[in-house]
Amino acid sequence: VRYSTTGTSSLENAQPVVVSTAYGEIALAHNGDIVNADALRAELQEKGWAFATSTDSEIIVRLLANELTVSGDMVKAIKNLTRILAGSYSLAILFAGKVFGLRDPHAIKPLVLGKLQNGYGIASETVVFDFLGGTALRDVAAGEVVVIDNKGYTSHGARSNAPKAHCMFEWVYFARPDAVLEGVLVYEVRKRLGEKLAEREQVEADIVVPVPDSGRAYALGYSETSGLQYVEGLIKNRFVERTFIMPEQKARELSVKLKLNPVRQLLCGKRVVLIDDSIVRGTTMREIVRLLRKGGAREVHVRIGSPPIVAPCYLGIDMKTRDQFIALERTWDEIAKILTADSVAYVPLETLVECIGKDARDLCLGCLTAEYPVEIKGEKFRGQQVLEYYIEEGR
Ligand code: SF4
């Protein structure tokens, strides 16, 4: 398993990362991104440590092995990690016949505890437990360590009313629509955003067409509120991967062409409202607009169910360089021109926050506001407490 953020998508970087210690093997799977990974790697290499991969996950597992050697206690060793690591990390660790889970002190990436027929488990999304015939019990709390063994599970160090920083992009795009994150069904958020988009950004048109699958719930909300008919004017080849997670731009462009087929009988002569969750670079959207026109659409009005992405993500989504963002320092009209669309409109930030239903201080909105919940060199820290605030002795 590999979604490349820090480190490439090569085989040796696939997870879990396994290391041997005097206490036995540790296997670790990591969702997130460690912002001080480079500094830690350099510091440890100076001490003579060698790394087999280019991932931040290997740094975590080697630090963990070291902490375990010092303390002899895995829970303590895991808790100590939170003093060293900055960034986002939901971890699943297999060691000595037990599963250990850790969610970072800002709870940036999701982690869920669930009950299975013969025990317990942890996963990024609640749907995993649906498939396995179990039940999702609750989100792992910010900074909490969960230990699962053959007797059940125990919780260590759940804490605090300190602000969280749940990644808003999980609700907008990344998570499955049937997942429940922090008690909020992803599908509902997307549909509400579509409704708001219709209230604010109506346009004279004939049909609403989603970009499948990411735009579906948004388009349904837009259609119900605007009264425009919902039409599946683009049909997806079900055997082709999601384009956003492909690391190479070329692969993404080729994939759009392989993936979507415009249905001429539904589109011909129509004024189309085209709906998707977000635009990052704009290359995929531009290609989709072109496909709709090829299918006979008379007008294409792009409506996006989240605010413009204008800043990098250092915390788990692979978009790290500023110059790639189509929305950076451009008006909506300028964006429409690049996309060859008749118009473009987005949802404002307050509406996004309202639709997720959380306090803005408990969300990471970094790629929309360029203010981040953890300190990142060269970027604006949004003024939350520094990491140490969350970590008290013995928790
Ligand atoms: S910067 Fe954006 S994508 Fe990255 S964790 Fe924050 S909200 Fe999510």
Image (cartoon, rainbow, N blue to C red):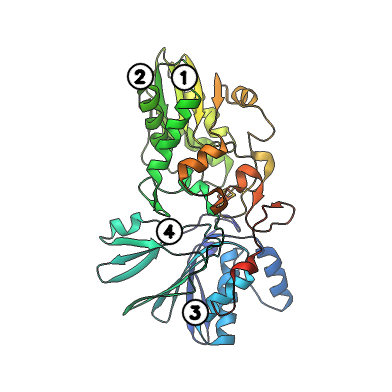
Q: Residue at x 56, y 39 (%)?
A: 349
For mark 1, what is the residue? 294
Element type at marker 3?
helix
> Which of these two is toward me, 63 or 284?
63
Which numbered mark, 1 or 2, is in the foreground of this view?
A: 2
For mark 2, what is the residue? 266
Which numbered mark, 3 or 2, is in the foreground of this view?
A: 3
* CA distance for labels 4 and 3: 20 Å
Residue positioned most to the front:
161
Residue positioned most to the top:
269
Looking at the rendered structure, the kind of residue marked 4 is: Ser
Sequence order check, earlier mark of 3 and 2: 3
Q: Are marks 3 and 2 in contact (CB under 8 Å)?
A: no
How crowded pointer 2 is (Cα within 10 Å; few <14, some 14-19, many 20+) is rated as some
Looking at the rendered structure, the kind of residue marked 2 is: Leu
Q: Where residue 178 sits: x, y (%)?
A: 35, 47
Residue 124 marker: 4
How crowded pointer 1 is (Cα within 10 Å; few <14, some 14-19, many 20+) is rated as some
* CA distance for labels 3 and 1: 58 Å
For mark 3, what is the residue? 75
> Which of these two is toward me, 369 or 212?
369
Q: Is residue 133 visible?
A: yes
* CA distance for labels 1 and 2: 12 Å
12 up-or-down from 72: above or below:
above
Sequence order check, earlier mark of 2 and 4: 4
Question: Would you say the beta carbon of the disc 3 residue lies within 8 angstroms of ligand 1?
Answer: no
Which numbered mark, 2 or 4, is in the foreground of this view?
A: 4
